[in-house]
Image (cartoon, rainbow, N blue to C red):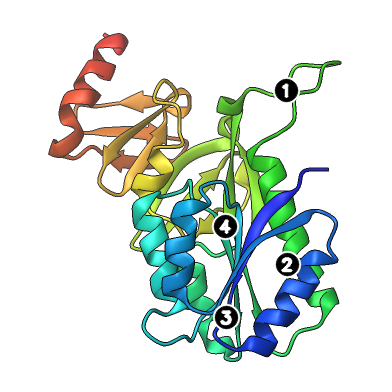
């Protein structure tokens, strides 16, 4: 079983001690450091580049847990350690979601709740880095992606995507077969980076289309099923190159 190297950060000694004790009794977690402030944790992370998970208190002096999470995301977007927030106030849940936290634990929490959140982190790490299976080759990465939908990761096959619509802080993924669209809290730009360019194209600042689902084209729009989607001037050059394949 994969072991996650983790640290705990909390300015309350009793709370910090409890989290560390929970970590040490969990077989798939390894406690690599404990810190009483976010500033100390940030300094420690420079010496511990292989940390995969942080149990992070939100309300701390000098630098809050949310601020630390934003600093880490700016430094290594999408590649840094995952975060499980610990807080006495559940109104911080949405803020935690916006900085891509895996989960949050409301104090006081017991070991069962801690283990549930930790298991989610372990599952995420396992999905992100699948082990090689000698008996059968792993499924190619470009055939699917994972979307965070209401605190869970949902696997979506590229072949099932019709088009993706950007809605401010969210994306709406329209699927084949009349399946209800999926709503995920991420940016269209972040999602675009995960999609293979040979299969998807951005045609508008708020639209990405699956190229194999296009039924008809004009110089200013594409048709996918019964949807007509405009092509904006910003993406016209790339679209014109694609259009040349149709002529």
Q: Nearer the viewer, residue 160 or 150?
A: 150
* Disc number lying in front (2 or 1): 2
Residue 153 horizontal/vertical position (percent): 65, 53
Q: In this view, does 235 lie above or below 198?
A: below
Q: In this view, does 99 lie above or below 173?
A: below
Residue 30 horizontal/vertical position (percent): 73, 56
* Disc number lying in front (3 or 4): 3
Residue under the image location 74 percent in, 30 percent down: 131
Kindly state the secondary structure of the residue where label 1 is placed.
loop
Residue with the mark numbered 1 = 138
Residue with the mark numbered 4 = 82
* Quarter of the picture holding the N terminus: top right
C-alpha gap between disc 2 and disc 4: 12 Å
C-alpha gap between disc 2 and disc 1: 27 Å
For marks 3 and 4 on the same chain, the one whose residue lies earlier in the sequence: 3
Q: Which of 47 and 140 is in front in this view?
A: 47
Badge 2 crowding class, 10 Å Cα cut-off, few under 14, some 14 to 19, many 20 or more, is: some
C-alpha gap between disc 3 and disc 2: 17 Å
Left or right, 20 with reference to 63 = right
Residue 237 horizontal/vertical position (percent): 16, 25
Residue with the mark numbered 2 = 117
Residue under the image location 40 percent in, 35 percent down: 209
* Quarter of the picture holding the C terminus: top left
On residue 10, which mark appears?
3
């Amino acid at each position: 079983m994969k072991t996650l190297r983790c640290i705990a950060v909390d300015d309350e000694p009793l709370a910090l001690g409890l989290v560390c004790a929970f970590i040490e009794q969990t077989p798939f977690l390894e406690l690599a450091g404990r810190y009483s402030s976010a500033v100390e944790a940030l300094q420690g992370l420079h010496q511990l580049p292989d940390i995969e998970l942080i149990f992070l208190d939100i309300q701390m002096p000098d630098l809050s847990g949310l601020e630390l999470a934003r600093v880490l995301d700016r430094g290594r977007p999408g590649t840094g350690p995952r975060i499980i927030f610990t807080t006495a106030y559940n109104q911080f849940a949405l803020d935690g979601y916006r900085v891509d936290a895996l989960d949050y634990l409301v104090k006081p929490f017991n070991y069962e709740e801690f283990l549930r959140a930790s298991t989610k982190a372990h599952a995420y790490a396992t999905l992100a880095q699948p082990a090689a299976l000698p008996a059968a080759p792993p499924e190619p990465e470009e055939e699917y992606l994972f979307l965070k939908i209401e605190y869970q990761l949902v696997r979506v096959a590229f072949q099932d995507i019709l088009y993706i619509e950007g809605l401010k802080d969210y994306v709406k993924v329209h699927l084949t077969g009349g399946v209800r669209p999926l709503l995920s809290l991420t940016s269209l730009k972040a999602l675009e980076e995960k999609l293979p360019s040979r299969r998807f194209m951005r045609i508008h600042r708020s639209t990405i289309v699956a190229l194999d689902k296009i039924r008809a084209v004009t110089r200013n729009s594409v048709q996918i099923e019964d949807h007509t989607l405009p092509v904006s001037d910003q993406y016209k050059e790339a679209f014109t190159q694609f259009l040349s394949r149709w002529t």
